[in-house]
Amino acid sequence: ADISDCLALYEDIINIRPKFILELGPGSSTAAICLAINSVKEKNPSYDPVFIAVESKQEWLDFHKKSIPNELISNVDLILRDEKVKNLFGQKVAYFESIPVYPYEYIHVDGPDIHGLGVNLQSDLITLENHLNENCVIVFDGRKKASRFSRKHMKGFNFRRHSKTLNHMLSKKHLKNGFLFDFLRRN
């Protein structure tokens, strides 16, 4: 994720304050989400979300555990899951195996490595759909085909580009916009 994506994720967590967060493919975005969790906790010490970040490669999981600052790492459960490919709706799709099921309210999609698996689509969100919170916000890190595929096969989710980045967003509820410049001025 680039800096604008990280700022947008940070702002989303500050504003939405989700209780259950899922990240498919951790990275610098994970640290941004963890930092936002800390910022919310400063104002509301009872805020203690479940944040799961799913990685498929042990060496990357180890790297993320070492690179995320110690004061932030306790906000995320970095887990290792295999990447697989299957057929769904007549398409070859990638997915992470055995993602923990929670009523996720916020999901950042930057994995699995669809191109490394020889596909352009993924099915994790479609598989989790019945378990998602009715107000779940799903942000895709530039995965246009994957986001459109999910939108096509998920009921009731609205699709738009994230207002502050080139990401795509699926949501069942309208989000407030315009906080990025306020955040940049304050910090």
Image (cartoon, helix red, strand yellow):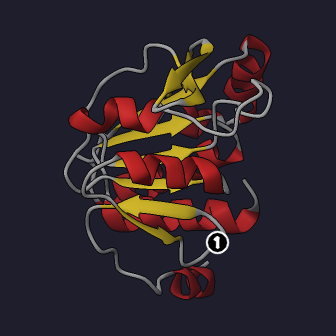
Q: Residue at x 51, y 48 (%)?
A: 149
Percent of width and height locating residue 23: 52, 38
Quarter of the C terminus within the rendering: bottom right
User: Which residue is nearer to you in this view: 117 or 102?
Assistant: 117
Reply above or below: 94 against 2.
Answer: above
**Left or right of 38: which side holds 40?**
left
- Give the number of callouts: 1
Q: Residue at x 48, y 62 (%)?
A: 169
Q: Residue at x 66, y 18 (%)?
A: 56
Percent of width and height locating residue 60: 76, 22
Reply above or below: 1 against 73.
Answer: below
Reply above or below: 64 against 11.
Answer: above
Q: Residue at x 32, y 63 (%)?
A: 16
* Residue 82 visible at all: yes
Percent of width and height locating residue 49: 32, 40
Q: Residue furthest left?
A: 134
User: Which residue is nearer to you in this view: 37 or 5?
Assistant: 5
The amino acid on which the numbered mark 1 sits, given as a three-letter code, is Thr
Percent of width and height locating residue 83: 62, 17
**Left or right of 129: which side holds 177?**
right
Q: Which residue is mark 1?
A: 165
Say which quarter of the image contains residue 72: top right
Residue density around tag 1, few if under 14, some if 14–19, many if 20 or more, within 10 Å: some
Say which quarter of the image contains residue 44: bottom left
* Residue 34 visible at all: no
Q: Secondary structure at mark 1?
A: loop
